[in-house]
Amino acid sequence: MRYATADEIGMSKSEKDRLMEPSRKLARFTTTLSQKPGRKPTRKSWPR
């Protein structure tokens, strides 16, 4: 199955940004976590 892109649905750029924001925050959170010495996120705590 193929998902329609945001452009095909006709979303504005701000709506796209709002959709992307949570994943951006999560990515920033995981990188800061992994940069701390001795605190590596394990597979168990970060399900993909």
Image (cartoon, grey):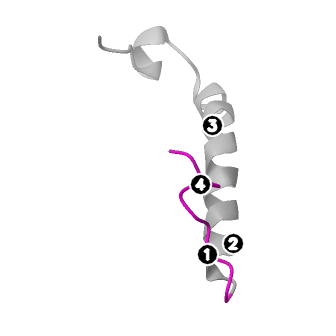
Task: Please rate how many residues cluster around mark 2, counting C-alpha atoms within 10 Å: few if below 14, some from 14 to 19, many from 20.
Answer: some
Q: Is residue 47 highlighted in magenta?
A: yes
Label drawn at residue 40? 1
Among numbered discs 3 and 1, the one appearing first in the sequence: 3
Q: Distance between the residues labelled 3 and 1?
A: 29 Å
Disc 4 or disc 1, which is closer to the eye?
4
Disc 3 or disc 2, which is closer to the eye?
2
Q: In this view, does 17 lie to the left or right of 4?
A: right
The residue lying at 69 percent from left, 84 percent from top is: 36
Tell me if label 4 and label 1 are in contact, CB under 8 Å.
no
Q: What secondary structure is the stretch in magenta mostly built from?
A: loop
What range of the chain is rendered magenta? 37-48
Could you say which quadrant of the image residue 40 lies in? Answer: bottom right
Instruction: Locate residue 12, reporting x and y percent.
Output: 58, 22
**In the picture shown, does residue 2 fall above or below 19?**
above
The residue lying at 53 percent from left, 58 percent from top is: 43
Q: Is mark 2 on a helix, strand or loop?
A: helix
